[in-house]
Image (cartoon, helix red, strand yellow):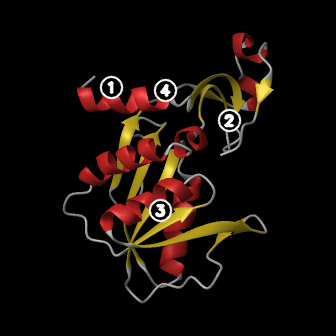
Amino acid sequence: MDPTQQEILDIFTRTKALLQGHFVLRSGLHSGHYFQCAQVCQRMDAVERLAQLLVTKLKGLSFTTVLAPAMGGLVIGQEMARQTKSRYIFAEKENNVLVMRRGFILAPGERVLVVEDVVTRGGRVNESLALVRQAGGTPVGVAMLVDRSAGTTRFDVPAFSLLELSFPTYAADAVPDSLAKLPIEKPGS
């Protein structure tokens, strides 16, 4: 592991954002590991550093707006927008569908970077990309703190992550006995 990757992992460990136990992920899958990025996002020094490291991965990517899906992407999305001097908007669930509210609109062709905290299967990111297109914008990339799929989740735009990790996930009817014995937690995304 290179020194930057170790620094990133140390930040997640120090802030207790990387948890172990029995968790139900937003996707409905079960896992023995959980990234609770809300823990790291309460430490603005850590958020600033993580965003700084993520921004360096975006060299050559041109965008004017950052869109983050609520809740997980809000803090890191805003910091990414601040550091890149971009406009910042967010999407939120309404009737279980991701929407832009609060008067947020996109100009035709507006170049948008979608920023998320943790991606497992990419559902919310794909919803965000579709939302940008429906609003007339042009999604140009995805930036995330953690890619739990270790790079296997694909999008139709370039994707950038600070950490690519793959912890096993299980369907509810395929949870191993060792994990099933632990109390289930659903910490929220």
Callout 4, which amino acid?
Arg
Q: Give residue 6's mark.
A: 1
Label total for image: 4
Where is mark 4, residue-wise? Answer: 14
* CB atoms of marks 3 and 4 within 8 Å: no
Q: Is residue 138 above or below residue 83?
A: below
- Residue under the image location 56 percent in, 44 percent down: 42
Circle 1 SS class: helix
From the viewer's perspective, tell me whether residue 10 is left or right of residue 104.
left
Q: Give residue 29's mark.
A: 2
Q: Is residue 27 above or below residue 105?
A: above
* CB atoms of marks 2 and 1 within 8 Å: no
Callout 1, which amino acid?
Gln
Crowding near the residue tagged with mark 4, few <14, some 14–19, many ≥20 C-alpha atoms within 10 Å: few
Indicate which disc, 1 or 3, sits on the residue closer to the N terminus. Answer: 1
Give x and y (percent) for residue 16: 56, 28
Where is mark 3, residue-wise? Answer: 78
